[in-house]
Image (cartoon, grey):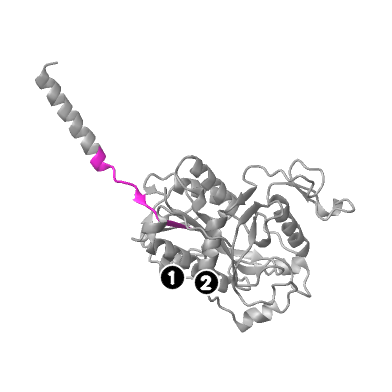
Amino acid sequence: MTSQSWLVTSLLLFAVSAGTAAAKPRPIPVKVVVVTMFEVGADTGDQPGELQYWVERDHLDHIYDMPAAYHSVRMNDQGEMAVLTGQGTAHAAATIMAVGLDPRFDFSHAYWLIAGIAGGSPDRISLGSAAWARWVVDGDLGYEIDAREIPPGWTTGYLPLRKKTPFEAPAEPLEGQVYAINPGLTAWAFNLTRATQLDDSDKLKEIRSHFDGDAAQRAPSVTMGDEISSSTYWHGKLMNAWAAEWVKYFSGGKGEFATTAMEDTGTLQSLTYLAHAGRVDLNRVMVLRAVSNYDRQPQGLSASESLARQRIGAYAAYLPALEAAYRVGHKVVNEIISHWAEYERTIPSQAK
């Protein structure tokens, strides 16, 4: 090849590569991802689910189709994204993995805020309150025998995998069975939002009056409390006692059960794998759940009678909990976006 031919070939290759580079847009930098789990109907304009307030109030008007996920994602011009995972751990895990691997987005410095409603223990939290979780424990992995065959002396028929009795020591959680959320970031989020005024009403006061529990009679507030995540929607005072012990068992006595939800171990498992792949920073994850209903029956009802009343959209504190999840979560989102120059590189942290 002559020097002139080599030059022409090189210029052609450079032009092709430059054209390819120009045709490939840079990934969109994402500052905060709000993870919601269910929506009742449309994203806007009807009865709200967990997504709707974020879309309408934060003007998440840019829609990105997501064929490999449960739902499209939505963004605004400030770098805020909202994801709708679908209900249950399987939907959540699949959706978060699809979103996290999408080459259109850069999540390398993004904060992830799980924000939704939950059941709550009247021993720890009141209706309409919002809780920041330090621990999320899976409630699905385990052995189970029918309650009618529980041996005398057992408090539950639900056992940890590979154990012979309930809560047999030592606890040996499998991968994905327990998640310790960044304690410094969680404490920072709590202290930022702890004074947030949450809605109370005569209706909530009347509903609370029918429940026993140390926290049942309190007005809604922002607190810290840990979560059990299970795709099985359980209910009743005996299951409540199991959940409290289950969280303590798998957190080494450090966790305090407050809320019960469905999807978060699926979301956290995918975020863990995405962190291994260098796509996300697991230290930038927060979990916020607001209490729409109690996880056990009120005075005068059986567990089955109480469970029959538990339906999405008809929970005792459904709208107050949606409002609390948005109002508390938005304070954190707004703080991060407003001071992005600081928080892009430095994760906020605060001792409790």
Report which residue position mark 1 lands on: 45
Q: Residues within 10 Å of mark 1 (few under 14, many from 20)?
A: few
Please indicate, yes or no, whether residue 36 appears anywhere in the rendered image: no
Q: Amino acid at mark 1?
A: Gly
Report the residue that reaches farthest toward the top: 1
Q: Quadrant of the C terminus?
A: bottom right
Check residue 323 in the rendering and tell me which mark sits there, or answer none: 2
Could you say which quadrant of the image residue 341 lies in? Answer: bottom left
| Disc sitting over residue 327 in the figure | none
Q: How many dots with numbers? A: 2
Kindly state the secondary structure of the residue where label 1 is placed: loop
Residue 46 appears at what percent x and percent y?
47, 70
On the image, the x and y values in percent for residue 247 come to: 70, 55
- The range drawn in magenta is 21-34
Q: Is residue 220 left or right of residue 241?
A: left
- Seen in the image, is 319 located left or right of residue 212? left
The amino acid type found where label 2 is placed reads Glu
Q: Nearer the viewer, residue 284 or 129?
A: 284
| Earlier sequence position, callout 1 versus callout 2 | 1
